[in-house]
Amino acid sequence: MAARVLLRRSLAGANSRPRLSAGGGLALRGLVSSASRPREDSWLKTLFVRKVDPRKDAHSNLLAKRETSSLYKLQIHNVKPECLDAYNKLCQEVLPKIHEEKHYPCALVGTWNTWYGEQDQAVHLWRYEGGYPALNEVMSKLRQNKEFTEFRKERGNMLLSRKNQLLLEFSFWNEPVPREGPNIYELRSYQLRPGTMIEWGNYWARAIRFRQDNNEAVGGFFSQIGQLYMVHHLWAYKDLQTREDIRNAAWHKPGWDELVYYTGNILTSLECWRQTFLHAIIFILQYIVS
């Protein structure tokens, strides 16, 4: 499912399903299962009483960070193979200037090329400090910026296709901050079944604790505009072997396997990037900046 604005993942067999411990509830205020419904007293009553979800707030308000009002934009550009070097050079020359300009309430979190996954692809992540008003302000100013207008025109000649999403960050994830490198970055994107974003948040509010020992968690986001019910997790590792070691170590921690099982059950599929799942190692062109 996608929303557009105009002007602009081995599961055990069914008989060996793991159970969550009785004391394993979440200490995350405000989150409830979006599958939960008021239990009716009788079958007859279900004929006359409409079942209503008692939750009265949007997923974005329940899951996003309240202490900040940052909005993120994820840009995916598929570049003509022969133009990738020129594209990278052009972006490195122009994009940081926008982030450095104090009159633009935005920050270039990072810009990367895909190493494994879809080839000849660029990924950009922007933060708009102030939410939608900040985004609108930046877009309005950029339309009047002659250098940026020329940049877009030149960049357009190098692209095969492009798409973007507007995202919010999960309240229980790390905020993307500068880190020492060099690193490889892994972007894992998940397509959820509609109505299961709250479950995902409940499970990952616990799961993220298993993945903090090596400072690999960079950021976690969920879509607001663009392809909906999508989650993006961004991880950083020293190299591929470090990635393998860290991920294997997680399976030796009690509880990790259960969380993987249950989150797997609320995904629609785990496929390639063009469909519903990106599992790409991306190397950084420009280190993450604040």
Image (tube, rainbow, N blue to C red):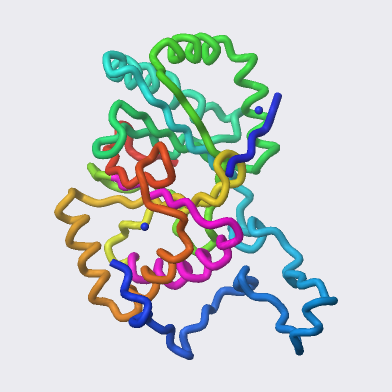
Q: Position of residue 183 (x, y in %)?
A: 24, 45
Across and down, in percent, residue 172 comes to 50, 64
State the residue at coordinates (69%, 28%).
6
Relative to the observer, which residue lies in front, 171 or 224? 224
Image height of 144 relative to 29, above or below: above
- Left or right position of 199 against 55: left
The residue lying furthest to the left in this view is 241
Residue shown at 31% from the left, 74% from the top: 12
| Quadrant in the picture for residue 280 | top left
Residue 267 location (% of width, % of height): 46, 58
Residue at 28% x, 38% y: name it.
117
Camera-side residue: 220 or 97? Answer: 220
* Picture residue at 79% right of the left edge, 84% below the top: 44
Q: Quadrant of the C terminus?
A: top left
Whether residue 197 is in magenta: the answer is yes
Mark yes or no: residue 116 visible. yes
Q: Quadrant of residue 181?
A: top left
Which image quadrant is residue 18 in? bottom left
**In the displayed structure, does residue 223 sit left or right of residue 157?**
right
Residue 219 seen by the camera: no
Residue 140 is one of the magenta-drawn residues: no
Q: x, y (%) of residue 289?
A: 40, 39
Residue stretch in magenta? 185-211
Residue 67 drawn above or below residue 142: below
Horizontal side, residue 281 vs residue 102: left or right:
left
